[in-house]
Image (cartoon, grey):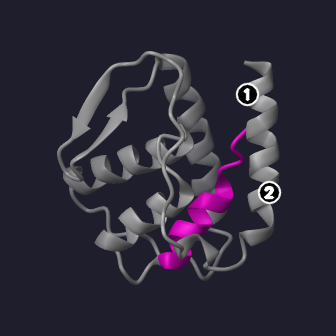
């Protein structure tokens, strides 16, 4: 587990130089497979599968999302996503959780986000920059 965290940190450092551009919009690669056994659920809004979070993971994910949300108000370029229905909110939560849990790559996150919100690439890159992946 400790070795996994070290590798994940090194990978995150490798991507940190790309955060100021739209380099994430390249063709996606295969997602990192989780080694943990977890309940798999189908997200009917995107027809993608994701692993349900454990209570510990859910708490850590929510802490990360609060940190990202607190940075939004300090960025005048960030335009809020129109998450005005329960379905859209659930889609966004599942999408960000899958990125946070490394069930999808950054490129897949951007691609899936732009499919619904094609003019908000800046916002999806902003969210990616908020994840530390450690």
Q: Residue at x 72, y 47 (%)?
A: 132
At numbered mark 2, what does the secondary structure look like: helix, strand or loop?
helix
The reply to whether the magenta stretch includes residue 20 is no
Q: Which mark is residue 4?
A: 1
Looking at this view, name the residue that lies furthest to the front: 30
Horizontally, residue 22 falls left or right of residue 40, namely right
Could you tell me residue 111's position as x and y percent? 41, 67
Asked whether 115 or 90 is in front, the reply is: 115
Asked whether 63 or 51 is in front, the reply is: 51
Q: Residue at x 61, y 67 (%)?
A: 126
Q: Badge 2: few (under 14), some or many (20 or more) residues near its Cα, within 10 Å?
A: few
Task: Name the dominant secondary structure of the magenta segment.
Answer: helix
> Mark 2 highlights which residue?
14
Q: Is residue 119 above or below residue 129?
A: below
Looking at this view, name the residue that lies furthest to the left: 44
**Circle count:** 2
Q: Is residue 70 above or below residue 115?
A: above
Q: Which mark is residue 75?
A: none
Magenta-drawn segment: 121-134
Q: Is residue 26 above or below residue 83?
A: below
């Amino acid at each position: 587990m400790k070795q996994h965290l070290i590798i994940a940190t090194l990978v995150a450092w490798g991507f940190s130089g790309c955060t100021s551009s739209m380099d994430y919009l390249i063709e996606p690669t295969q997602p990192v497979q989780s080694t943990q056994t977890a309940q798999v659920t189908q997200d009917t809004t995107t027809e993608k599968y994701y692993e349900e979070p454990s209570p510990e993971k859910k708490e850590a994910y929510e802490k990360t999302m609060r940190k990202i949300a607190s940075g939004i108000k300090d960025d005048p370029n960030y335009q809020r996503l129109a998450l005005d229905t329960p379905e859209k909110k659930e889609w966004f939560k599942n999408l960000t959780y899958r990125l946070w849990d490394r069930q999808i790559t950054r490129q897949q996150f951007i691609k899936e986000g732009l499919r619904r919100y094609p003019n908000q690439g800046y916002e999806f890159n902003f969210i990616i920059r908020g994840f530390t992946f450690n």
